[in-house]
Image (cartoon, helix red, strand yellow):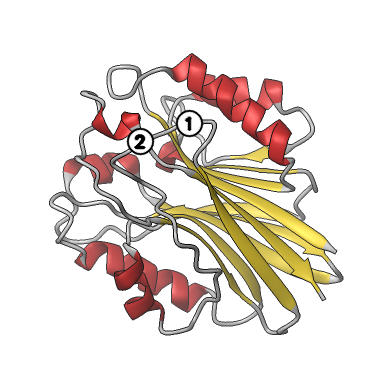
Amino acid sequence: MKLKILDLNLWMLPSFLSSDHKKRLQGFIQLVKKTNPDIITLQEVWLRKYIAFIRKNLRGYHTHHPGHKLFNKSGLLTLSKMKPSAWHFHRFPKLRGENRVEKLAGKGYLMIKLSFADRQFHIVNTHLYCESPRNKRKLTEQQFAMLKRLTVKGDWIVCGDLNLDESKFEKLNKKHFTHHTVKAFTVSAENKYTHSRLNRFGFRDLKLDYTLIRTEKNNIRLRTKVLQKPLVSDHYAVLTTFTFI
């Protein structure tokens, strides 16, 4: 049996903060139809109209998001072909030193529970704290530590923009999660959207987006690909295939 998960920071901020929304959304729909994932985990889908567009064009998926009257709190959106048995959103505890943008974003994690291969999996979609300048990582590291404590028992898959480069991730992970290491960046100076005048970060080549697994049984193989085309965001999409053996 196989399970495919597509993960992407979609960069769907309000129009004055990002660009080419319609073009990129249409490209994203084509990407989904081409890759045919079982689960999709998205970050930075902030406005309800973007969620409505995705739901309308991907009718074969169940959709879950934190929701809010004004915007999609935390920016998280998870879609799955299988109907989850349960789902919930949990905001990370407020941390001393958070900047105003991150406080407004309300970062946290969105979890759905699914039965697959005679096991119950917890699928976590998250977007960890991003502080500028990027050498200040303490708050991001604290949130990652929370994810590790959350996933001690049971079967877990964690997807999202962790805002940790690979060397820092490996140092903090300490073999808690398993993942397929790929020699490819998920944000790159070659991506034209990282140079957009509306992008508040000056990106360099980094791997910030991950699909991770923590399981009580060692019978799953995973393989990850970074998809640079079609270009639909200032991040590249991450497609991971889980093979149950």
In which quadrant will I find the C terminus? bottom right
Q: Position of residue 93 (x, y in %)?
A: 33, 61
Camera-side residue: 108 or 29? 29
Question: On screen, 10 above or below 148?
Answer: above
Q: CA distance from mark 2 to mark 1?
A: 8 Å
Residue 47 quadrant? top left
Camera-side residue: 79 or 86? 79
Q: Position of residue 61 (x, y in %)?
A: 75, 37
Name the element at disc 1.
loop
Which residue was labeled with disc 2? 191
Residue 80 quadrant? top right
Numbered label attached to residue 231: 1
Residue at position x 26%, y 26% in the image: 196
Amino acid on which disc 2 is placed = Asn
Q: Are marks 2 and 1 in contact (CB under 8 Å)?
A: yes
In which quadrant will I find the N terminus? bottom right
Residue 222: in sight, yes or no? yes
Amino acid on which disc 1 is placed = Leu
**Quick one: label 2, few (<14), some, or many (20+) residues within 10 Å?**
many
Question: On screen, 1 above or below 201?
Answer: below
